[in-house]
Image (cartoon, grey):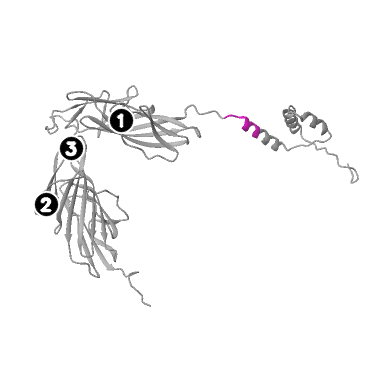
């Protein structure tokens, strides 16, 4: 045992395993220039490291030297779900791509669609940061350098080929693990002749053949012909899936009502609207275009047809005005909505009322909601004032209505003199 007067020797015991790693460590660097001389000069000294530290250093060296193998594919389309609608001379398509990008840092260019003659894009997708859609030659590519999962939706129109009543069109997309095309058509206008088409509840499903969707159809004799004796499915019942209303009221009591109806039907139809008492109809728009009308008392009948042949419906917009007594300091309000002859599945109504009052809902078939969907009306006007939103399901044979109580709102509306 050394005593206090004996100089401490620079010798540290290590286990056999640690010593072995130390020898390997020394050997791995002994070939570097100047290392041999330095070793000879320091043979009188030695040092040791804990085994855990030696292993950590070796792991770091291995990680630096290891080159990560790239993925077998940089990116792929895991699923392509396309929906389409037949027109007289074209196919209108919406294609949704589920994309998986496996490589990070390097630019990836994934083919989505072949822009063959007669193909035009009608809708571009919303792209995340660091990604874009590019066209090179006749191919539409998705380009990014960020790893992750992406969902894109492209709209396109493919013109048909053929003569007489027969039409055909083919669409080539990029390779996808799963690809489907759900096709809708008006069976009063067209008959689908695509091989392998599978009939579904609302149309037909097609799968690609040779990397392409092959769509072929035959036009019937005339757009206005009667339905064939044997139909593949029952006709679509006319219905209004959604209706939107916007009413702007002024302090003088005048109000402007805009009512927009989204219709679902086939062929040509008639829809009748019954106006609430005191509401005077001023304008009617069909598919965004103003049309003449004749009102009989409180009813007006509108002949409707799709904006384009083969569309499953259209839109009707009514613009009406009403006048009532001026607002008092407090009181009650009642607003009624036109009633169509078709069932309305869902109705939204926005009231824009003077800001000097506070309002509370007191009744009616329409009930308050926090917000209503934003829509674009064909007849554009400002909508000042407080916005109150209301909603109702299943309107059939009755006029939707809402009742409110109001009181003057003096908060912040008075003046304090000096």
Instruction: Please state the horizontal and vertical placement of residue 38, each as a whole percent of the image.
Output: 79, 32
Instruction: Please state the horizontal and vertical placement of residue 92, each as a whole percent of the image.
Output: 26, 33
SS category of the residue bearing label 2 = strand
Instruction: Please state the horizontal and vertical placement of residue 181, each as a whole percent of the image.
Output: 30, 30
Q: Which residues are magenta?
A: 59-67
Mark number for residue 299? Answer: 2
Q: Residue at x 25, y 65 (%)?
A: 405
Residue 147 inside the magenta-drawn segment: no
Residue 138 vertical position relative to residue 351 in the rendered view, above or below? above
Left-right relation of 94 to 89: right
Q: How far apart are labels 1 and 2 at the CA level?
A: 43 Å
Position of the N terminus, as image quadrant, is top right
Residue 246 vertical position relative to residue 110 in the rendered view, above or below? below
Q: Residue at x 73, y 31 (%)?
A: 25
- Dot 3 or dot 2: first in sequence order is 3
Q: Residue reaching furthest right?
A: 5
Kindly indicate whether the residue at mark 1 contacts the one at mark 3 (C-beta within 8 angstroms).
Answer: no
| Main secondary-structure element of the magenta-colored stretch | helix
Residue 61 inside the magenta-drawn segment: yes
Q: Which residue is mark 3?
A: 266
Residue 343 vertical position relative to residue 279 in the rendered view, above or below? above
- Dot 1 or dot 2: first in sequence order is 1
Q: Which residue is mark 1?
A: 181
- Dot 3 or dot 1: first in sequence order is 1
Left-right relation of 159 to 49: left
Q: How far apart are labels 3 and 2 at the CA level?
A: 23 Å
SS category of the residue bearing label 1 = strand
Q: Is residue 200 visible?
A: no
Q: Is residue 323 visible?
A: yes
Mark 2 burial class by Cα count in 10 Å: few <14, some 14-19, many 20+: some
């Amino acid at each position: 045992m050394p005593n206090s007067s004996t100089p401490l020797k620079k010798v540290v015991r290590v286990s056999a395993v640690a010593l072995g790693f130390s020898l390997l460590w020394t050997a791995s660097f002994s070939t570097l220039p100047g290392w041999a001389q330095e070793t000879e000069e320091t043979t009188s000294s030695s040092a040791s490291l804990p085994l855990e530290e030696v292993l950590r250093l070796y792991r770091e060296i291995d990680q630096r030297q290891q080159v990560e193998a790239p993925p077998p594919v940089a990116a792929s389309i895991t699923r392509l779900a396309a929906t389409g609608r037949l027109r007289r001379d074209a196919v209108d398509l919406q294609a949704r791509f589920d994309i998986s990008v496996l490589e990070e840092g390097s630019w990836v260019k994934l083919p989505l669609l072949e822009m063959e003659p007669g193909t035009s894009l009608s809708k571009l997708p919303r792209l995340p940061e660091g990604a874009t859609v590019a066209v090179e030659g006749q191919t539409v590519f998705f380009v990014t350098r960020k790893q992750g999962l992406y969902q894109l939706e492209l709209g396109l129109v493919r013109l048909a080929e053929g003569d007489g009543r027969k039409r055909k069109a083919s669409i080539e997309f990029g390779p996808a693990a799963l690809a489907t095309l759900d096709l809708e058509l008006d069976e009063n206008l067209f008959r689908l002749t695509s091989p392998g088409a599978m009939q579904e509840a609302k149309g037909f499903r097609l799968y690609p053949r040779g990397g392409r969707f092959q769509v072929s159809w035959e036009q019937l004799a005339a757009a206005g012909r009667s339905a064939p004796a044997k139909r593949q499915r029952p006709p679509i019942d006319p219905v209004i899936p959604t209706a939107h209303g916007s009413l702007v009221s002024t302090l003088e009591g005048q109000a402007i009502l805009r009512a927009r109806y989204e219709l679902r039907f086939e062929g040509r139809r008639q829809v009748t609207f019954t106006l609430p008492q005191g509401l005077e109809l001023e304008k009617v728009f069909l598919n965004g275009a103003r049309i003449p009308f004749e009102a009989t008392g409180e009813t007006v009948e509108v002949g409707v047809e799709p904006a384009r042949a083969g569309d499953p419906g259209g839109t009707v917009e009514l613009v009406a005005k009403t006048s009532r007594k001026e607002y008092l300091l407090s009181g009650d309000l009642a607003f009624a909505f036109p009633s169509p002859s078709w069932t309305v599945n869902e109705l939204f109504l926005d009231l824009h009322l003077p800001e000097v009052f506070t309002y509370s809902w007191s009744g009616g078939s329409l009930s308050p909601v926090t917000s209503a969907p934003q829509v674009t009306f064909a007849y554009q006007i400002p909508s000042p004032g407080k916005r109150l939103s209301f909603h109702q399901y299943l309107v059939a044979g009755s006029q939707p209505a809402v009742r409110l109580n109001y009181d003057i709102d003096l908060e912040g509306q008075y003046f304090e003199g000096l």
